């Protein structure tokens, strides 16, 4: 998107100009989150895949934004975003 601008080809005595408009590709889910079932005290990994690599991801539990901690770990590799929840308790459902 930042490449949107007017570009010029200059040959000294003459110039040719063109406007370049770059349309952003919407980010879609290639693979959505799947429901998981895990025993208390274990670890679970939730994974989703996006259509655009390195898209910023915000993880939430209900309406609450999660932050990296001993309990929650976030990983992102290209188009794959992961949330790891450690020491799962019933309140994590």
Image (cartoon, grey):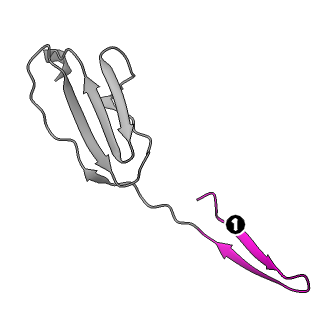
| Residue in the picture at 18% in, 21% down | 43
Q: Is residue 89 above or below residue 16?
A: above
Q: Where does residue 39 sit, x and y in percent of width and height?
A: 8, 19
Question: For this rendering, which residue is in front, 86 or 93?
Answer: 86
Q: Would you name the residue on which mark 1 appears?
A: 5
Please tell me whether residue 18 belongs to the stretch shown in magenta. Answer: yes
Is 22 left, or right, of 29 in this rendering? Answer: right
Is 57 part of what is drawn in magenta? no
Depth check: give the residue in front, 84 or 61.
Answer: 84
Name the residue at 39% across, 46% down. Answer: 78
Q: Position of residue 32 (x, y in %)?
A: 23, 47
Q: Position of residue 69 (x, y in %)?
A: 37, 16
User: Which segment did they paint magenta?
Assistant: 1-21
Q: Is residue 62 visible?
A: no
In the figure, residue 65 lies in which quadrant?
top left
Examine the rendered structure and indicate whether residue 58 appears above or below residue 91: below
Asked if one can make out residue 23 in the rendered structure from this viewpoint, the answer is yes
Does 83 sit left or right of 87 as displayed? right
Residue shown at 85% from the left, 82% from the top: 11
Quadrant of the image containing the N terminus: bottom right
Q: Looking at the picture, how far across and down is residue 54, in whole percent? A: 44, 45
Give the answer, above or below, for where 78 lies relative to 16. Answer: above
Q: What residue do we see at 33% from left, 14% from top?
A: 70
Left or right of 32 on screen, residue 27? right
In the current view of this chain or complex, which residue is farthest to the bottom?
13
Q: Quadrant of residue 41?
A: top left
For mark 1, give the secondary structure: strand
């Amino acid at each position: 998107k930042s490449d949107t601008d007017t570009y010029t080809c200059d040959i000294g005595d003459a110039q040719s100009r063109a406007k370049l408009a770059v349309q952003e590709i919407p980010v879609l889910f290639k693979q959505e989150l799947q429901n998981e079932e895990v025993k208390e005290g274990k670890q679970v990994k939730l994974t989703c895949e996006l259509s655009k690599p390195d898209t910023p991801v915000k993880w939430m539990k209900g309406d609450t934004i999660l932050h990296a901690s001993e309990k929650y770990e976030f990983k992102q590799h290209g188009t794959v975003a992961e949330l790891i929840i450690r020491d799962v308790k019933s309140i994590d459902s």
